[in-house]
Image: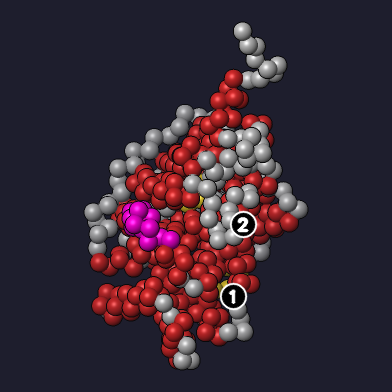
């Protein structure tokens, strides 16, 4: 008769086998700590996403619940099927594009606009299924990829500055500085610097700390009403089942659907490569274990998230915080998912958060996303001009779609105009031609 090793937990033995903890040089305790760390760095999304989507007219309480649910489903799926320490949640940037551009500026209903996100996610899934996703990632030039990421960052930062009242409309100069005597301006700026300073000091929960501090000050100033901490989760019927999937099958929305798909393509794929590289799981070509499964989980989560009424779902770069404290397997992601499920019961806290309390997070995301501009070869105008056009035209035209379109077209123009047409590839040429046809026949 054999006796179990002293101190051995049969549940820990099961987790060892399922997640191959010993093979990855980690333990159950380390994975739990890593999961908690990742959750604390990205939990701000349950406050920020409902705030942003509420600008589109969506029920903020229902969106809070669906945000928690899809983050839980996606993260647990990534942990179980791909065994990667990567958490999944609604994407920053695409939620702002949805609320402020497609609904706010273009005047589509949120139901139709969310349907466009759904079809963009379906397109991403099809690209993954047909392995075209890998081809696109490999053939879209670095300068355009950087321009897209940076342009979205500038766009998000502009929304954060607007929500805090730091910039306001001006008929003579388009925009101008807001009044620094307003609570929203002061607290919005304070929130941003809290995040930036804490992040510079490697404090992983910087965004969460900023939201708590600025909301607490708002409570003291009378801007916020205390509504309690715990409650039964609010209903989601005001959102779930109302996405107009068929109504989004409109030719005028083709460019928007393509934009949602393209942005999510680079955002999620780049994040997966970045997190797995940080964990020491990726090779020199960016390939990592269970890559195919991870891409399937990522794209299926996007389809499910949009069908439920949240913005497109993606892998979160904040997962690197959990990796930095030792997370190496899918157990980390499952811990994150379980914590998101538990967060559903704190809806009163989420409804207390004012817009200016999340503005700092939007501005900070802009800082992170525009930092990739250092990767552009600024000495080569055929690369730097398309990157610049892509990045600046997103906020200046108030359209992520137009920024991407003009960037692709500028890339072709610069390569053709300088006699370097051999550097063009089929992917860039085809996408550019599609955008030109859209401008001529759809936008005219």
- Residue 133: which quarter of the image? bottom left
Camera-side mark, 2 or 1: 1
Q: Residues within 10 Å of mark 2 (few under 14, many from 20)?
A: many
Which segment is the magenta one?
121-134
Colour setup of the view: secondary structure
Disc 2 to disc 1, C-alpha distance = 27 Å
Q: Which mark is residue 209?
A: none
SS category of the residue bearing label 2:
helix
Quadrant location, the C terminus: bottom left
Q: Which one is in front, 114 or 166?
A: 114
> What x and y, as percent, mark residue 244?
27, 51
The reply, left or right, for residue 202 in relation to residue 356 is right
**Which is nearer the eye, 104 or 67?**
67
Q: Residue at position x 63%, y 50% from top?
A: 280
Q: Residue at x 55, y 35 (%)?
A: 19
Residue 376: which numbered mark, if any?
Answer: 1
Residue name at image x 40 percent, y 69 percent: 401
């Amino acid at each position: 008769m054999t006796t179990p090793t002293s101190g051995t937990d049969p549940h820990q033995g099961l987790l060892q086998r399922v997640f191959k903890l010993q093979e990855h040089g980690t333990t159950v305790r380390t994975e739990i700590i890593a999961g908690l760390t990742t959750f604390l760095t990205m939990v701000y999304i349950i406050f920020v996403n409902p705030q942003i989507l509420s600008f589109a007219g969506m029920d903020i309480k229902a969106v809070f619940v669906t945000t928690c649910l899809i983050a839980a489903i996606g993260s647990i799926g990534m942990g179980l099927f791909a065994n990667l320490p990567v958490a999944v949640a609604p994407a920053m940037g695409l939620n702002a594009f949805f609320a402020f551009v497609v609904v706010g500026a273009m005047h589509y209903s949120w139901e139709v606009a969310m349907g466009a996100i759904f079809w963009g996610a379906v397109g991403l899934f099809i690209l993954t299924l047909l392995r075209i996703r890998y081809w696109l990632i490999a053939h879209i030039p670095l300068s355009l990829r950087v321009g897209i990421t940076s342009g979205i960052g500038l766009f998000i930062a502009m929304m954060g500055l607007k929500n805090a009242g730091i910039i306001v409309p001006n008929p003579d100069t388009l925009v101008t500085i807001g009044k620094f005597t307003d609570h929203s301006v002061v607290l919005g700026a304070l929130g941003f610097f809290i995040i930036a300073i804490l992040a510079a000091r490697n404090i992983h929960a910087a965004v969460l700390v900023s939201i708590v501090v600025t909301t607490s000050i708002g409570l003291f100033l009378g801007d916020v009403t205390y509504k309690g901490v715990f409650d039964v989760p609010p209903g989601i019927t005001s959102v779930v089942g109302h996405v107009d999937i068929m109504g989004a099958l409109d030719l005028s929305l083709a460019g928007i659907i393509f934009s949602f798909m393209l942005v999510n393509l680079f955002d999620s794929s780049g994040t997966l490569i970045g997190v797995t590289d940080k964990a020491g799981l990726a090779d020199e070509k960016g390939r990592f274990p269970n890559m195919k499964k991870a891409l399937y989980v990522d794209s299926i989560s996007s389809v499910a998230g949009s069908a439920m009424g949240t913005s497109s779902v993606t892998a979160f770069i904040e997962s690197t915080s959990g990796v930095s404290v030792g997370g190496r397997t899918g157990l980390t992601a499952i811990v994150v998912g379980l914590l998101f499920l538990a967060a559903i019961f704190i809806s009163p806290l989420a409804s207390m958060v004012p817009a200016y309390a999340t503005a700092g997070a939007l501005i900070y995301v802009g800082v992170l996303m525009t930092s990739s501009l250092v990767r552009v070869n600024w000495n080569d105008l055929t690369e730097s001009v398309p990157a610049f056009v892509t990045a600046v035209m997103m906020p200046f035209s108030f359209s992520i779609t137009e920024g991407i379109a003009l960037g692709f077209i500028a890339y072709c123009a610069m390569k053709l105009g300088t006699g370097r047409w051999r550097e063009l590839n089929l992917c860039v040429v085809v996408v550019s031609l599609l955008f030109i046809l859209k401008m001529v026949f759809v936008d005219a």
